[in-house]
Amino acid sequence: MNKFTDSLESELKALETKGNLRQLPHIRHEGREVVVNGQRMLNLSSNDYLGLASDRKLINDFLRTLRNEEVLFSSSSSRLLTGNFSIYEELEEQLASLYGAESALVFGSGYHTNSGILPAIANTRTLILADKLVHASLIDGIRLSAARCIRYRHNDTMQLRRLVDEHHKSYDYIIIVTESIFSMDGDEADLTALIELKHAYSNLILYLDEAHAFGVRGPHGLGCAEEQNCISEIDFLVGTLGKAAASSGAFVICRHEIRDFLINRARTYIYTTALPPINIQWTSFILSQLKNYESKRNHLSYISQKLRKILIESGYSCPSTSQIIPIVVGSSTDAILRAEEMQRKGFYVLPVRPPTVPEGTSRIRLSLTADVTEKEIDQLINAIRE
Ligand code: PMP
C-alpha cells in the first residue's frame, strides 16, 4: 500500500512542479462576491451568467410557490424505478415546448448527458468527428463509445468538410460533435456551415452542446441555435441547467424516437438516482421566467463586448465572442501569478491549466455575469492594464 500511495504522491509532486496541482479553494460566498483567505473579491469565475443563483428575491418567490407537504429533497430512485415524479415529465414538456421540439430528456448533469448519450448512439459503424476543443464530458462520451473518432482542428470547417467527404461512404452515420460557445476560449462554432454540411450529406447527425449559451443567447434565452433560427436542424441539442439557469442537471432536445431510445440505452440516465424533485421544481420555475431576462442578456452582451474590445486594443489576442473571456498567458506558473495579482486587486479570477486546456495555453478565464456593473468592468480593465 505504501508503494502505491508513494507513487500517487510522486505524481502529485510532478504536477506541483509544473504548476498544475489542483486544490480545493476555501470560499465563502456572499452574493456576487466571494471571500477567500479573508479577502473579499468580485466573483468573475462563476457560470451564473444571468446572476440568478444568489438572487434572494427570486429564491423567496420560488419558496412561496411550494406547499410544505410537496417538498421533497430526494427522488430516492432512478426514474425507471420509482423516481419518475410527474414534475419531471412536466419539465420535459416545458422544455420541448420552449424549443418547439418533439421532446426533451432531463439528465442528472451535463457530464452525465454527454458521457451517456454518445456511447448509447454510436457503434462501430459510426464515425464521430469532434472539434479539438470540446469539453471533457464529450471526450469521455466518445471514449466510452465503440465508434471511431477523429478530432478536427478547432472550428476548422474546411477540414471537417474534407473529413466528411472522405469518410461518409464508409460509415452508417457520422456524428459531428461541437459546442456552440466553447467553454475555455469563449468563441463560437459556425452553425450555418455545419448545417450546410448536414444538408449536403444524407448520413450526418449534429450534436451541439449549448452549455454556455443556454439562458444567455437567443431572444428567449434558448441558446445559439435559437439565435440563429436553426433549432430544428440540430439532432441533439444539449443544454445544462447549472450555469445560467442557476440550478443543476441538464437536458437534451431531440426527436421522440431518440428520447425513447436514450431511456433504454443511456447508462448515465438509467443507472443513477433522479435529481431531487425540489431541484426540478426550481428549474421549472426559472425556465418559466427565462424569456423575461432579455435585459440581463443584453447587459451581459454589452459588458462582454466592451471588455473584449479593450483587451484587443491593449494587444491581447482574444478569440472570444461571448461572456467567457480568456487571457492566455502561456505557462501554468505565469497563469497562477497573474490570477493571484488580479485577486489582490479584488477580482476573483482563476488560472485554467492543462489538462483542461492544451499545454502552453494556460490562461486566466474571466466569466462575466449579468450582475457585474459597467463601472466594475471599467475597474477590471484598469486592473488588467496596470
Ligand atoms: N458541457 C460543457 C461545454 C461544459 O462546459 C460543462 C461544464 N462546465 C458541461 C458540459 C458539464 O455540465 P455539468 O456541470 O452540468 O456536468
Image (cartoon, rainbow, N blue to C red):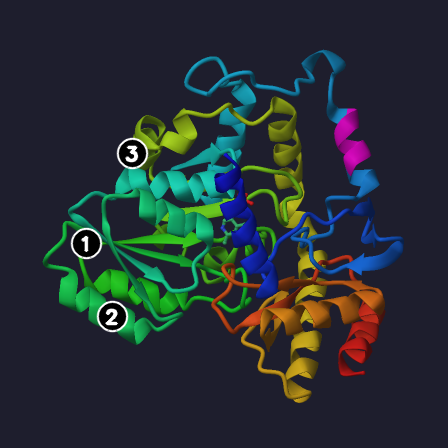
- Distance between the alpha carbons at the discs numbered 1 and 3: 17 Å
| Circles 3, 2 touching at the beta carbon (< 8 Å) | no
Marker disc for residue 203: 1
For the point 21% across and 67% down, which residue is it? 163
- Magenta-drawn segment: 59-64
SS at mark 2?
A: helix
Q: Position of residue 336 (x, y in %)?
A: 68, 67
The x, y position of residue 101, in whole percent, is 41, 42
Residue 91 shows in the view: yes
Amino acid at dot 1 = Asn
Query: Which residue is rendered at x = 15% and y = 67% of the image?
Result: 166
Tell me if residue 62 is in the magenta stretch. Answer: yes
Mark closest to the chain's N terminus, 1 or 3 = 1
Q: Which mark is residue 161?
A: 2
Residue shown at the point (78%, 69%) measured from the top left: 342
Sequence order check, earlier mark of 3 and 2: 2
Q: Is mark 3 within 8 Å of ligand 1?
A: no
Residue 383 position in % (x across, y down): 81, 76
Residue 208 falls in image quadrant: bottom left
**Residue located beneath label 3 in the image:** 257
